[in-house]
Image (spheres, rainbow, N blue to C red):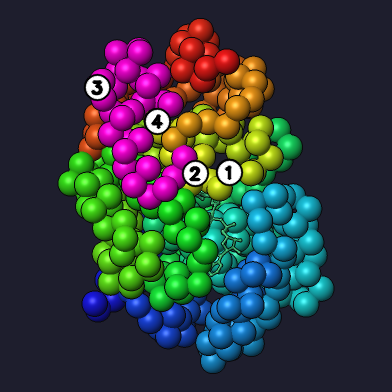
């Protein structure tokens, strides 16, 4: 398959996502065209650094001198402490306003390195080079950057759109299996909110996806990115419609926070989608049977569909600090059915729910 290009249209801040097997070799051209700089710094986690760090540094160094900075892998490291350590390291090497960041890795790296770029010297450019399926189809696009706090996920952050995204699906060959499945959960989410046929295709392609088959992955990443780019273009700063991308995420973020990140993000999103579909059905918003369709698709990927045992109170407390919460009232983005997100009144795409109903869906 040849490389595909999807454009996120945001006026002057528009950028291209280049997707395909081997597109990493195009990084120097992409940097020179979209993000010329006097110096680059690749930020990556220690695991991804082992696989691709020197190669990406050397590719960027054909354009301008390039540093390689790392932090320890894992969601629990997406913190202000690592934002500080990386920012201090950039100051120590003397990266200037004419410098730029290359975020190489999964969603944790994209969010953390993007936040460093957004705040360093009041903001320098970033190019996203995602290496996990989740980062390719979801987190590298849309400009959300930030870190977690003990109170919850992504509570500190800013919007900072990348100059370009380069998604080389051959890098997924080294991604551990559970992370391929977890990435597929977000692809199923894209199908569920906007394209029922795509939802079915993601299910049908599961064997090839889990085998990291490059052409199948490239086609899946291209479709997901096209769907996400359309939503981001319509609502860059999540004032309305962009909230549909948060289907499943109110419960997912609470599961991640309360569980100490024992679940992968995509695993938590899968469970969250099933439980929120059940909640939406009880509220008369989501068609009956949507939860079962989601559960079947997730189970085909070997993903969990039930929440881990534990107190519903702790989850409810965590939901109240979710970014979508307003005056302490929990908000949800719901599906109408597989292939269509539910719209609330006017410009509003999120819904509140009575606490007893949330509780009954969470179980004891
Ligand atoms: N900004 C957004 O819009 C957005 C959207 C969705 C998710 N997210 C965030 O993304 C994060 C989850 O992303 P993730 O699942 O990619 O997590 P991650 O970055 O932790 O990557 C998962 C694991 O895979 C390893 N890895 C990544 N690429 C690899 C490769 N090619 N080969 C071998 N190992 C590799 C990493 O070292 C890590 O251990 C969460 O923090 C979530 O909040 C952000
Ligand atoms: Zn997500």
Q: CA distance from mark 3 to mark 2?
A: 23 Å
Give the residue number, with chain letter if any, for mark 2.
Answer: 267
Determine whether label 1 and label 2 are within 8 Å by CB: yes
Residues rendered magenta in the picture: 275-304
Residue 282 in magenta? yes
Determine whether label 3 and label 1 are within 8 Å by CB: no
Q: Position of residue 270 (x, y in %)?
A: 43, 39
The quadrant where residue 102 appears: bottom right
Upstream in sequence: badge 4 or badge 3: 4
Give the residue number, with chain letter if any, for mark 1.
Answer: 263
Q: Position of residue 295 (x, y in %)?
A: 35, 35
Task: Judge from the rendering whether residue 88 lies leftward or rightward of residue 135; answer left or right.
Answer: right
Upstream in sequence: badge 4 or badge 1: 1
Label 2 crowd (10 A; few <14 / some 14-19 / many >=20):
many
Question: Front-most of 104 and 231?
Answer: 104
The quadrant where residue 325 appears: top right
Determine whether label 3 and label 2 are within 8 Å by CB: no
């Amino acid at each position: 398959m040849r490389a595909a290009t999807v454009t996120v249209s945001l006026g002057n801040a528009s950028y291209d996502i280049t997707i395909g097997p081997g597109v990493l070799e195009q990084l120097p051209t992409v940097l020179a065209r979209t993000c010329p700089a006097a110096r680059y710094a690749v930020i990556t986690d220690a695991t991804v650094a082992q696989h691709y760090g020197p190669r990406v540094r050397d590719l960027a160094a054909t354009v301008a001198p390039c540093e390689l900075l790392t932090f320890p892998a894992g969601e629990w490291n997406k913190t202000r402490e690592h934002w500080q350590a990386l920012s201090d390291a950039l100051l120590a090497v003397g990266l200037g306003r004419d410098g730029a960041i290359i975020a190489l890795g999964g969603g944790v790296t994209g969010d953390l390195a993007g936040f460093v770029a957004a705040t360093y010297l009041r903001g320098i450019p970033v190019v996203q080079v995602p290496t996990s399926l989740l980062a390719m189809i979801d987190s590298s696009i849309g400009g959300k950057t930030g870190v977690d706090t003990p109170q919850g996920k992504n509570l500190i952050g800013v919007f900072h759109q990348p100059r370009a995204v380069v998604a080389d699906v051959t890098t997924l060959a080294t991604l551990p299996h559970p992370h391929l499945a977890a990435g597929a959960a977000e692809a199923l989410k894209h199908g569920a909110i906007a394209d029922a046929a795509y939802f079915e295709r993601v299910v049908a392609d599961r064997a090839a996806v889990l085998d990291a088959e490059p052409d199948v992955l490239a086609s899946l990443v291209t479709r997901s990115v096209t769907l996400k780019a359309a939503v981001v273009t319509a609502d860059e700063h999540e004032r309305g419609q962009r909230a549909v991308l948060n289907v499943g995420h109110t419960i997912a973020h609470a599961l991640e926070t309360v569980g100490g990140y024992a679940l992968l993000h995509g695993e938590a999103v899968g469970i969250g989608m099933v439980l929120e579909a059940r909640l939406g059905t009880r509220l008369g918003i989501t068609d009956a049977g949507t939860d079962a369709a989601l559960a079947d698709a997730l189970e085909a990927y070997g993903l969990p569909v039930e929440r881990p045992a534990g107190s519903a109170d702790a989850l409810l407390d965590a939901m109240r600090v979710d970014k979508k919460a307003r005056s302490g009232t929990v908000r949800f983005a719901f599906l109408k059915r597989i292939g269509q997100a539910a719209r609330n009144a006017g410009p509003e795409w999120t819904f509140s729910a009575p606490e007893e109903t949330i509780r009954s869906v969470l179980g004891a």
